Amino acid sequence: MKNNLVCPVCEGACSFLDVVDFNKSCEEVRGKFLDLTGVPIYYAYCSNCSFCFAPEIAAWTLEEFEERIYNEEYILVDPDYVAIRPEANAAGLISMFGERAISIKHLDYGGGSGVLADVLKKSGWQSVSYDPFVDRNVSVDQLGKFDLITAFEVFEHVPDVQQLMSNLRSLLAPDGVILFSTLLSDANIHVNQRISWWYASPRNGHISLFSRNSLTNLAEQSGFNFGSFSEGSHIFCKEVPAWASHIIRLA
């Protein structure tokens, strides 16, 4: 492992913070533990923006992710991803935007098999799903521009955060909004302490763990404002458009 690590977010100096077993999963919060593999996964920490990441996994190919993480056993560590979570997120969006959504173009980025977009389309939305892991034959520049981009439980899975931001910028309309979810690490990851946070789980593919400062950095680099509705729900945009002003107030 390299010791001279540079932060993918702010290019600050990073050092290794802790090591966990590859089978550490989010299901541990529910009292369900997988057998240890004996495979060490190191997490590095940026002293400048507090971004925390697993550099070895971040260097994997898509094929390696598919073989080791997003395989037939993935449902054991994330049973809600197939239908429960996307259907709940779709219901939340329908409630949030109401009839205004009919006039906007929506992209669900990192949408997996497209369940969320399918539910929205049945409610009259102009909704498209795109997932870099799933839609490998589709290039970002083929998709067009979107007024609303959602990325639910995506950021923590991304091996290249700068590529993610580049993709989102290219897909967002000039007055568009990005709504995304990822838990903030601020109260959960600390220097000189073991990583016990349930969200830091390599078996789930949680390899990029964001502090508020690191998300603020990414927003500023892209010319976005950044705000949060809660510890886990956030927004990037340049300005809040009129069609979203009834539910969005930048923090």
Image (spheres, rainbow, N blue to C red):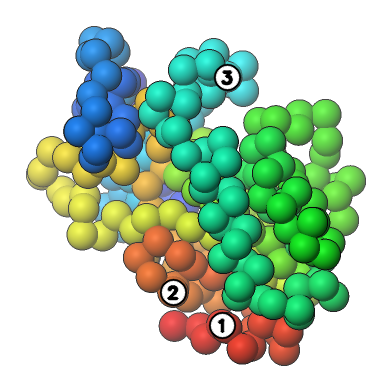
Mark 2 in CB contact with mark 3 (< 8 angstroms) = no
Q: Nearer the viewer, residue 99 or 235?
A: 99
The mark nearer the N terminus, 2 or 3, is 3
Relative placement, left or right, of 139 versus 12 is right
Q: Position of residue 161 (x, y in %)?
A: 54, 46
Quadrant (top left, top right, bottom left, bottom right) of the N terminus: top left
Residue indicated by mark 3 = 66
| Label 1, residues with CA under 10 Å away: few <14, some 14-19, many ≥20 | some
Residue type, mark 2 in image:
Phe
Residue type, mark 3 in image:
Glu
Residue type, mark 1 in image:
Ile
Q: Which mark is residue 229?
A: 2
Tell me, yes or no, if residue 84 can be seen here.
yes
Name the residue at 89% across, 46% down: 142
Name the residue at 44% across, 73% down: 228
Q: Which mark is residue 248?
A: 1
The mark nearer the N terminus, 2 or 1, is 2
Relative placement, left or right, of 212 versus 196 is right
Tell me, yes or no, if residue 12 can be seen here.
no
